[in-house]
Image (cartoon, rainbow, N blue to C red):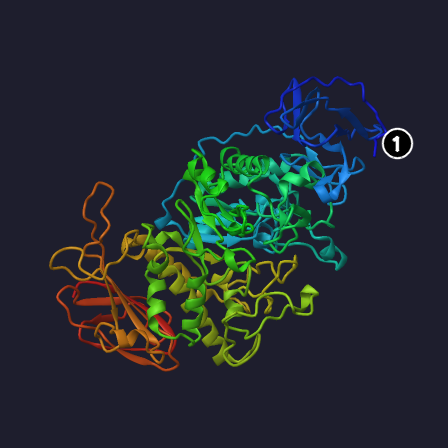
Amino acid sequence: MTLGLWRTLGEHAPVWPGRNWPLGATWSPEATNFAVHSPAATAVWLCLYDDEPGEPGERRLPLTEQSLGIWHGAVPDVAPGTRYGFRVEGPWQPDEGLRFDPDTLLLDPYGLAVAGTQDDAQSVVVDPAFDWGDDAPMRRRWRDTVIYELHVKGFTRLHDRIPPELRGTYAGLGHPVVTQYLQDLGVTAVELLPVQQFFSEPALLERGTVNYWGYNPIGYFAPDASYSSSGDRGGQVTEFKQMVRSLHAAGLEVILDVVYNHTAEAGADGPTYSFRGLDDRGFYRRMPSADGYDDTYWDVTGCGNTVNTEDPLALRLILDSLRYWVTEMHVDGFRFDLMSALTRTAGTDGIPVDMACKLLIAIGQDPVLRHVKLIAEPWDTSMDGYLVGGMPPPWVEWNDQYRDTIRDFWRGRSDGTHAVATRLAGSSDLYADDGRSAYNSVNFVTAHDGFTVRDLVSYDAKHNEANGEDNRDGTDNNRSWNHGVEGETSDPAVVALRRRQAANLMATLCLSNGVPMLTAGDERGRTQRGNNNAYCQDNEISWLEWRADGEPGAWLDVYEVTRAALRLRREHPALRQRHWFEGRPAIVGGPKDLAWLHPSGREMTDEDWHDSTLHTIGMFVSGRPLREPGPRGEQQIDTSFLIWFHAGPDAVEVHLPDNDWVHAGSVVLSTDPGLPEGTRVAVGALVSIGARSVVVMQESDA
């Protein structure tokens, strides 16, 4: 194939040699340097696009310089906002990973912005200048972190206190109404569903839907333009930075959910947007075969392809992208989607998980990246990719074992309280044996993928018919309970029980040792109408409804419980400890740092731990003193707490044990209407706790 039939306007315009670094388009007032990696190409053209009236369109300039597989050149008088792309010539040999087609305009893998629609997308030259003022990395300690997972568009799309033109945008998320809400709730970090430029799968577009979640990336440096109120010619970059600056000013860190394991180019028959047309052989993994590797993409992501992190340039792109978001966009950390897929190392036995892979070593040694928050989703779609408890420092992990155990406990399906206690105390079975701390566990009961908390207590089964896949998609392992009625109901008894159960789940999450992650809207009863896989629902199914107190469907009692639990956590270091509990005194003659109590008032026995009929557990946490020293090595003193988790269907009487250290207390949080906050309690007393309730008792003077 040749470019002979293509318009060649401006082919004699000056193209200076430029340089082969940095990759991408680097603007300066004198000239813009373009550099793109395509080692097997035979020719590369830079294509520029003008918006001036009367301009005929594409202007193609040959990049005649090549070094180390990188084609480069500098072009004077290219203004920020200029659209561009690449056309690449070379052999068409798909079976060897060579897919060059000059008829296809390719996006710049290092492009800082993307303009246009999915069918005519082009990269954009960006002036990166921005006044950050005194903004600086926050570096909040993990033990003090509370994560709030949200979708940029869905969080504000229906918010009536945000100007209509800003709803669903980066600017909307940075609005004072949002930052004030998050501050009042008590979270400390927002974890944004993917905001790197993404496209929708062709099959979704054919069904009239889109990829709402964004787990289909194509531009690892570009903030997605669909969330911009400032246009797509670089305004999205500035607006994203303004959002980060506003969130930081409110004391909120910004964590990005990043998808480096696959791209929107899908399988071998998928579309070509960028990587495939530049270096298909290097960027994507191939299936191992007897004589090397064949043309079948190796897929442990379920999306058609897997990025090859053993390839030096693919690895470089990921690292450069991560550093860019930290240094230029000021984000505070990352949550890596399907992290296991990125840890694969080819060997004689296939492509197994390797905890000493190049990517993990490079991130761990990088002077920028090793100091930001790094969260792994420690699994992929294969059986051998489940790595919960196995990620090396400095990584923390999404802990789905916490999710499953806590869900089972509150729906009355627990096999015993031992597993529940382990999760409440920080999952030492997963993290203590290799020197890690409880904060290595990111605890959650819901996430974007699955039921909301409201749906978790309202549906026994998924209802994904709106997705157009005959309800086949989405997990069937929901561990949910509808409490007698499937879906929404006006039965006041059922609604009251569901709201109490939702409050129980939220309180448990906020008071467990580890790092809590809340899903946006769970604290106020957001529903997806039983859809547990709303990835293609860019509508009211996914958007957060901001119902006011008293409006039908507003579960603001759950909000108040969540807010109160987070306040207790924030104000009391006893409830967010870094050191592991040891079940023995922190000082000679003192109380145990942690004790598990039977409703009778005695400590739990081995037999109790495995009693499947026992639905009540008391968690005594001592604050006198904490095992963890203060910043100068001083002994830390806090009040002590006794937290009762009662998942039984009937009320239970609990005996408050007599002891030498705590003599009286008061209820400071309760989901039991019959045991309100402020109730005084004393040792030796019998206290009745209502069915399915959390009650937090705090030490006080007698």
* Residue 422 in the figure: left or right of residue 451: left
Q: Residue furthest right?
A: 5
Could you tell me which quadrant the N terminus lies in?
top right
Please name the residue shown 52% across and 66% down the image: 554
For residue 631, what is the image quadrant?
Answer: top left
- x and y percent of residue 431 in the render? 35, 55
28 vs 49, left or right, is: left
Locate residue 443, reporting x and y percent.
Answer: 42, 58
- Residue occupying the point 52% across, 33% down: 328
Instruction: In this rendered view, identify the residue nearer to me: 325 or 245.
Output: 325
Q: Using the rendered view, name the quadrant where residue 590 is placed.
A: bottom left
Number of marks: 1
Q: Is residue 235 above or below residue 182?
A: above
Query: Outermost residue toward the front?
Result: 290
Residue 648, quarter of picture: bottom left
User: Of 111 and 573, which appears nearest the observer?
Assistant: 111
The answer to whether 385 is drawn above or below residue 29 in the figure is: below
The residue located at (71%, 20%) in the rendering is 77
Q: Is residue 98 left or right of residue 588?
A: right
On the question of residue 137 being in view, the answer is no
Look at label 1 and name its amino acid: Leu
Residue located 58% across and 29% down the image:
128
**Is residue 346 visible in this depiction of the protein?**
yes
Can you give x and y, in whole percent of width and height, for residue 418 in the image? 33, 70
Image quadrant in which the C terminus is located: bottom left
Which residue, given by chain and number where applicable, does mark 1 sit on? 5
| Residue nearer the viewer, 404 or 393 | 393
Which SS class for mark 1? loop
Indicate whether 117 appears above or below 576. above
